[in-house]
Image (cartoon, rainbow, N blue to C red):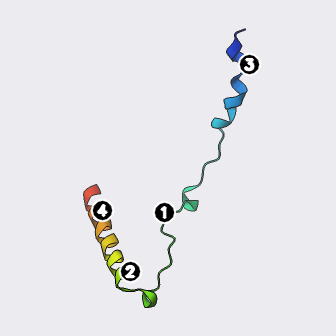
Amino acid sequence: MGRAQGHKTRDKNKASLPQVPKNMKSDGNDVEYSAEFADHADLEAMARANAAGQRVKRRNK
C-alpha cells in the first residue's frame, strides 16, 4: 500500500458541490430606475449602455 492511498478523502467533496439552477441566477441588472429622478448624466449613460448592448448583439450574430 502506497502513501497516497490514505489521503484521498480530502478531495471527495469537489464532485458533490451544489449547482445553482438557471432560474435562480441573476444577470447583474438589479438596478431600480426612476425617470423622474434622472438627470442629464443618467440619460447619457443609459444611451451609451444601450448603444454598447446593441454593438455586442450585432457582433455576436
Query: Where does the image place residue 60, in percent across and percent down from the top left?
Result: 29, 56
- The tag earlier along the polypeptide, 2 or 4, is 2
Q: Give the residue drawn at x 68%, y 16%.
A: 4
Q: Secondary structure at mark 1?
A: loop
List the residue tagged with mark 4.
57
Asked if residue 56 lies left or right of residue 17, the reply is left
Q: Secondary structure at mark 4?
A: helix
List the residue tagged with mark 1.
27
Between marks 4 and 1, how big is the CA–CA gap?
Answer: 16 Å
Are discs 4 and 1 less than 8 Å apart at CB?
no
Q: Of circles 2 and 4, which is in front?
A: 2
Q: Secondary structure at mark 3?
A: helix
List the residue tagged with mark 3.
6
- The tag earlier along the polypeptide, 1 or 2, is 1
The crowding category of the residue bearing disc 4, from other C-alpha atoms within 10 Å (few below 14, some 14 to 19, many at least 20), is: few
Q: Is residue 2 above or below residue 59?
A: above
Instruction: Check the picture and name the quadrant holding the N terminus.
Output: top right
Identity, as a three-letter code, of the amino acid under mark 3: Gly
